[in-house]
Image (cartoon, rainbow, N blue to C red):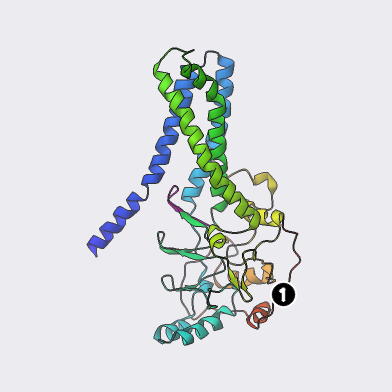
Amino acid sequence: MAPSHALRCCKRALNWIPVLFINLVVGWSYYAYVVELCVYTIPNNPERISYLVLFHIFFTMFIWSYWKTIWSKPESPSKVFCLPRAEKELFEREERAETQQEILKKVAKTLPVYTRTAGGAVRYCDHCQVIKPDRCHHCSTCEMCVLKMDHHCPWVNNCVGFSNYKYFVLFLTYAALYCVVICATVIQYFLKFWTKVLPDTHAKFHVLFLFFVAALFFVSVLSLLGYHLWLVGKNRTTIEAFRAPVFANGPDKNGFSLGFKRNAAEVFGDQGKYWMFPVSSNSLGDGHSFVTRLVHIDPERANGILQQNGKSPADGKPDPCVHGNNIQYTADDSKENIEGGQTDSVKVENEQ
């Protein structure tokens, strides 16, 4: 046990190396821009002050969104998705997979769960011992199920999912803009040093290297940002882009797409004035149930089930997964329709 614990601690420590690397690069870029460029290279105060103000605006937004992405704890499923005690005991005693699936299907009928495995089985996590909500996946690095999991990002040492996807997209956005500001303001002095208009000083290396690093990071970040903005517009996660979610009538890569406007609102919230700030902006939904193009899910009814069984109406945060006999489930009529092979349509905006 001791060696295993030590190895786990070492692994967790090593996971912070990419984060440390990013912070060292950003720290050096701050020194190179503020001290070597603005203090030692730029000759006049008006230009120096304007550059410093512009730089610090985007630097602050970049760091703010980056650290919000890192420190936003991934959300796990509410306890309502755990098997009740009686069903859990039956499930653990049963050795036949078919009978285990019957137990899971019985419990899943009372939950806002509409996706299945590729083989049509109820998605169940053996590690967390929980029925997976739609769009939820188990992260082997975080060792937990993550609501609306997109991917595990080593550069933030965190899972990107329902709790921090907005912050992650803003982190990429401001990282790209940060690089643009550096390249746009440094280029004239880069050319002057390159063509030897300015004399060789200790600032030359920092200014030249700063431009190259910013340009390189901009190209790499821009491609990733473009991909995730495309995912936002389609209302898909990275996992769903590679493997379409499976509904009662089969896989559908656009199953959660409700039109560009509503898709964006699910990530950034319904108040546009908060979209560009890494703050909570009332993202639509709670990460446990989602409106789809194929099935009508009554948000009030779904929230009622979750609040009654696993979520506190006061703080809106799920309780830890606790098994007990006091869990009461409420049947969902629309779920009976999908189990019988029928689907209820919903009116959605045309996808753009």
Magenta part, dominant SS: loop
Q: Nearer the viewer, residue 134 or 212?
A: 212
Work out whether residue 349 can be spotted: yes
Which residue is label 1 attached to?
A: 344
The answer to if 25 sits in the magenta stretch is: no
- In this picture, is 131 found above or below 189? below
Question: Looking at numbered disc 1 in the image, what kind of residue is underneath it?
Answer: Asp
Task: Name the spot of residue 276 as percent of width and height, x first.
Answer: 62, 43
Magenta part of the protein: which range?
153-162
Residue at image coords 48%, 24%: 34
Disc 1 element: loop
- In this picture, is 348 found above or below 32? below
Task: Name the spot of residue 267 as percent of width and height, x first.
Answer: 62, 54
Q: Residues within 10 Å of mark 1 (few under 14, many from 20)?
A: some
Q: Nearer the viewer, residue 236 or 265?
A: 236
Task: Name the spot of residue 44 as percent of width and height, x first.
Answer: 55, 13
State the residue lying farthest toward the front.
195
Work out whether residue 279 can be spotted: no
Question: Where, quadrant-wise, is the C terminus in this rendering?
Answer: bottom right
Residue at image coords 54%, 56%: 163
Question: Where, quadrant-wise, is the N terminus in this rendering?
Answer: bottom left
Residue at image coords 52%, 85%: 102
Q: Give the mark count.
A: 1
The answer to if 159 sits in the magenta stretch is: yes
Task: Name the spot of residue 122 as percent of width and height, x first.
Answer: 53, 77
